Amino acid sequence: MANTASTPGGGGAASGGNGKNGKNGGSAGKNRKDLPPPLPEPLRVPVADSHTHLDMQTGTVNEALAKAASVGVTTVVQVGCDLDGSRWAAETAAAHENVWATVALHPNEAPRIVLGDPDGWSRQGAREPGGDRALDDALDAIAALASLPQVRGVGETGLDCFRTGPEGMAAQERSFRRHIGIAKEHGKALVIHDRDAHDDVLRVLAEEGAPDTVVFHCYSGDAAMAKVCAEHGYYMSFAGNVTFKNAQPLRDALAVAPLDLVLVETDAPFLTPAPYRGRPNAPYLIPLTLRAMAEVKGVPEDTLATAVAANTARAFGY
């Protein structure tokens, strides 16, 4: 997730359309923002959605899981972005066998905790500054959640130079480094949000020493960076934006990414794949992205699905 914090139990981000995607670019029919896309043809080989935000989608968790399962998406990884959202993720995973949780403070959440939000830079509502002590307390709470068995990863954490200005980068980086330590302490996957910060993310990973498992969520680097990630054994998770017309650099990266390091995700309710860009995303739309990925990789759909299923289970310790 790039632009918003989690709102446990709500659906506001989804009800307003797909905030990450900008214009819906379509007619009042196929691309109406207020209509969910139709069910795609089911996958023959079941896979997992490696990164979603059920707490930001409309409907109930049970409804979302049933709809996903009907098209072969049998597991979802529910990702925390703030303390409340991480608690909700852990609780939801405890209640649903086919939901796995990750917990973290989103890179844009850390500076909000420290500096507050007096001028609305984050577009997430007013907030009083809490200083470094508040950030430390929140990170301690994330560390406690990371010890739970249903929590399979620490994330999404990382760096975001798009939304956070220079004054907030110190808090982001301090938070990122602590999350790396938490992941290593508990033997959990580190799920990285990297927006306009490729070099710095790789630098911090090198300086801290990466955990055994690293997942670049919504991979946004180029082919050269994909080769660097492959050399280090980092997983690259591709979302619906790999289907966008202007996303050739992402497709080039996917083309060189090793099959055993590729994951698929929705980042729902954001990044709805073509041809439904601009409408609410959800785990049941994974087949659209996976099929587009298979074309890029030049492999049969079932081959990619089999690899993705195995990769996701390995990455999240199943």
Image (tube, rainbow, N blue to C red):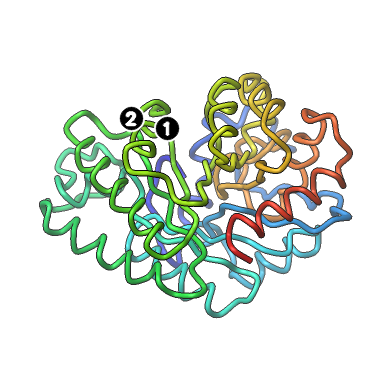
Question: Residue shown at 40%/57% (left/top)?
Answer: 184
Q: Using the numbered discs, state the Cα–Cα distance from disc 1 to disc 2 in whole angstroms.
A: 6 Å
Under tag 1, what secondary structure?
strand
Q: Is residue 156 above or below residue 170?
A: below
For badge 2, the amino acid type reads: Cys
Viewer-proximal residue, 151 or 232?
A: 232
Q: Is residue 26 visible?
A: no
Residue 145 appears at what percent x and percent y? 37, 70
Number of labelled discs?
2
Mark toward the start of the polypeptide (1 vs 2): 2
Residue 185 appears at what percent x and percent y? 37, 62
Mark 1, other Cα within 10 Å: few <14 / some 14–19 / many ≥20 = many
* Residue highlighted by disc 1: 195
Viewer-proximal residue, 65 or 217?
A: 217
Q: Is residue 298 left or right of residue 102?
A: right
Under tag 2, what secondary structure?
loop
Q: Is residue 297 above or below residue 245?
A: below
In which quadrant of the rendered image does the C terminus lie? bottom right
Q: Quadrant of residue 246?
A: top right
Q: Is residue 70 visible?
A: yes
For badge 1, the amino acid type reads: Arg
Q: Is residue 302 left or right of residue 74?
A: right
Residue 293 appears at what percent x and percent y? 75, 35
Outermost residue on the bottom side: it is: 95
- Dot label at residue 309: none
- Dot label at residue 161: 2
Residue 198 appears at what percent x and percent y? 42, 28
Question: Residue shown at 69%/30% (left/top)?
Answer: 243
Question: Residue shown at 60%/55% (left/top)?
Answer: 315
Contact between marks 1 and 2 (CB within 8 A): the answer is: yes
